[in-house]
Amino acid sequence: MKTSEVIQAWGRILAGYMPALSIEITRECPLACPGCYAYGNNHLGGGVLLNQLSDFKGEELVAGILKLVDQYRPLHLSIVGGEPLVRFRELSQVLPQLSARGIHSQVVTSAVRPIPAEWARIDRLTFVVSVDGLPAEHDVRRKPATYDRILKHIAGHRITVHCTITRQMTGRAGYLREFMDFWAARSEVSKIWMSIFTPQVGEDSYEILLPEIRARVVAELLELREIYPKLDMPRGLIRAYAEPPGDPDHCVFAKTTLSMTADLKHRVTPCQFGGNPDCSQCGCIASAGLVAVGRHRLPLGIRVGSIFDASLKIGRLVGALRESGPPVIPRPKEALTDAGDI
Ligand code: SF4
Ligand code: SF4
């Protein structure tokens, strides 16, 4: 994060706004990835699933996204899903307008269909393409967004490759290095990010990294960043994977990012994972990046995180004077009496 961006974000926090907004612009996705949190039973609190929501298409979606952006005035917008590219026509209208408003947008996609060529000319727009391991693992997990398709669909663009490390990728020494060799060599790839699979509390899926494996992955990433400049992960960020925030109240990312679901009305809490994520095993790169910023000490020994916490308190007071913010979807018990809300 550049100093100017930190100062801008700080200004937004003091004014009572969340500097980042994330919108699930559609409930649809042609993939069925194991471990997908968006379609998990508790993603929206357990009352309704993402694919049961009423979402939007066409002009309604365009207007809905711009309305949210004008209301919450983020510096940074993540466009997620479902699969955002199923709404590529709408995004072709929205993305230039976001850029004109000075907002930095990122489209987080599986690249299951081509990224439109004209999007390469839009300023302040980046593409984050999910590639979960080498073809043997990725193509099984993320079909039909296979390596072959991704390579065709990113042609002519500059993208960030985002890999979520699961236990399946940790059984063989040298796996992550092979992954880096493949993607770092490609001219379309400007950056590579590595997250670690984040489970829900009580989840026992095979994707979860055991503590000793997690420690080994952290050590390996620290080595890989010295070899591959495209691995855009500062040391502090990687070390944060060894010591995640613990709970949402200690997660700067959760406190500074407003996540909205596909009805464009309700909020996903406590963070983009929704449900009850196991923060003690958090492997979200955005969260880890802000943990690293928060743990940084200024010359007088003051932790950046302390300044942030004080600013957030002021910002909440200021924000409360202005508006109450979007609601969450009622939990199942409440939903019985208030089901008409969605
Ligand atoms: S592409 Fe994303 S939203 Fe779709 S199934 Fe996979 S993880 Fe879930
Ligand atoms: S981003 Fe990670 S640490 Fe933050 S609330 Fe979500 S799971 Fe917890």
Image (tube, rainbow, N blue to C red):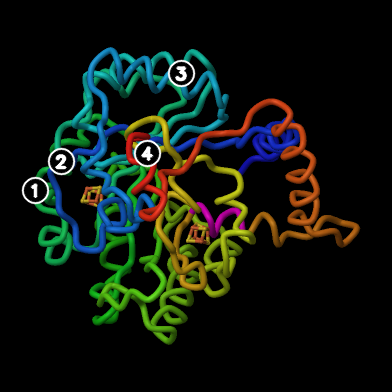
Instruction: Please name the residue that numbered disc 4 is placed on.
Output: 261
Residue 144, numbered circle:
1
Residue 46: x and y in percent read: 33, 56
The yes-or-no answer for disc 2 within 8 Å of ligand 1 is yes
Q: CA distance from mark 2 to mark 1?
A: 7 Å
User: Amino acid under label 3?
Assistant: Lys
The kind of secondary structure element at disc 2 is loop
Q: Amino acid at mark 2?
A: Val
Q: Amino acid at mark 1?
A: Pro
Q: Which residues are magenta?
A: 286-291
Kindly tell me whether residue 313 is visible in this rendering: yes
Q: 331 above or below 34?
A: above
Q: Nearer the viewer, residue 102 or 87?
A: 87
State the SS at label 1: loop
Q: How far apart in space, not on screen, are marks 4 and 3 (Cα)?
A: 14 Å
Q: Measured from the top left, where is residue 306 in percent x and y?
A: 79, 56
Give the distance between the C-alpha atoms of the residues marked 1 and 4, in whole angstroms: 24 Å
Asked whether disc 3 touches disc 2, contact meaning CB atoms under 8 Å apart, the reply is no
96 and 36: which is toward the camera: 36
Disc 3 to disc 1, how far (Cα)? 33 Å
Residue projecting furthest to the front: 337
The residue depicted at 43 percent of the width and 56 percent of the height is: 231
